[in-house]
Image (cartoon, rainbow, N blue to C red):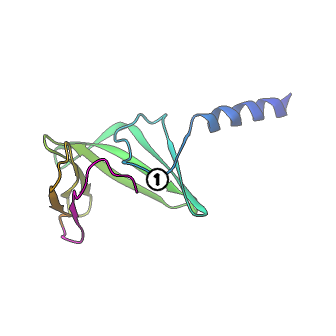
Amino acid sequence: MKNIGIVLITSIVLLSFTKTKLNGYITLFDSADNAKYYTYGKSHYFEYFDNKKKTIAGKKYHIKYRKYSWGNIDTTFIRKGKSSYYHIDKKTLEESIILPVTPKLGDKWLENDKSWSYEVIAEQQKI
């Protein structure tokens, strides 16, 4: 009887995750009970949002966690502005654009620290 209970609980937990290949933008602001499972090569990670928001520098951010197969966990703080989605560096309190809300061909933007540049070069494409 004890084994049946363990199998039932394990099955429910595993069925609550969605397996997804890296073939599109990650849905922003999913509820915490909607984790995504991504695979790449022999590695994988889970990505999920906390149901609570965190206020940083006077703005409310959604909290996204990414737990890797080797145990590391990354935390990202994301908010939606009028024209773009942003993430914030908690150490410097500087925001960078993740993606325009309505990206258009030719849109360009930089990470706040200028380490990465982005440009929309095509629409409706598959890699």
Q: Quadrant of the N terminus?
A: top right
Residue 12's x, y, as percent?
Answer: 65, 31
Magenta region = 113-127
> Is residue 78 depicted above or below 95 in this figure?
above
Q: Quadrant of the C terminus?
A: bottom left
Farthest-out residue, right: 1
Indicate yes or no whether the magenta region holds residue 41.
no
Judging depth in this view, the residue of 15 and 77 nearest the camera is 15
Residue for point 15% across, 55% down: 107
Closest to the observer, 68 or 41: 41
Q: Compare residues 89 and 36 and report the one nearer the observer.
A: 36
Query: Looking at the picture, does residue 23 appear above or below residue 13?
Result: below
Residue 118 colored in magenta in the image: yes
Callout 1: few (<14), some (14-19), or many (20+) C-alpha neighbours within 10 Å? few
Residue that extends furthest to the bottom in the rendered view of this protein:
115
Pointer 1: what residue?
22
Going by the numbered disc 1, the residue's amino acid type is Leu
Residue, x 44% and y 51% (percent of image)? Answer: 23
Question: Horizontally, is 53 left or right of 38 in the view?
Answer: left
Give the secondary structure at mark 1.
loop
Side of 96 where 22 appears, left or right: right
On the image, the x and y values in percent for residue 98 come to 25, 53
Q: Overall secondary structure of the magenta stretch?
A: loop
User: Residue 54's spot in the image, x, y percent?
Assistant: 29, 43
Total numbered labels placed on residues in the image: 1
The answer to which quarter of the image holds residue 17 is: top right
Which residue corresponds to the image point at 57% horizontal and 34% vertical from the top-left? 16
Tell me residue 5's x, y (percent).
77, 29
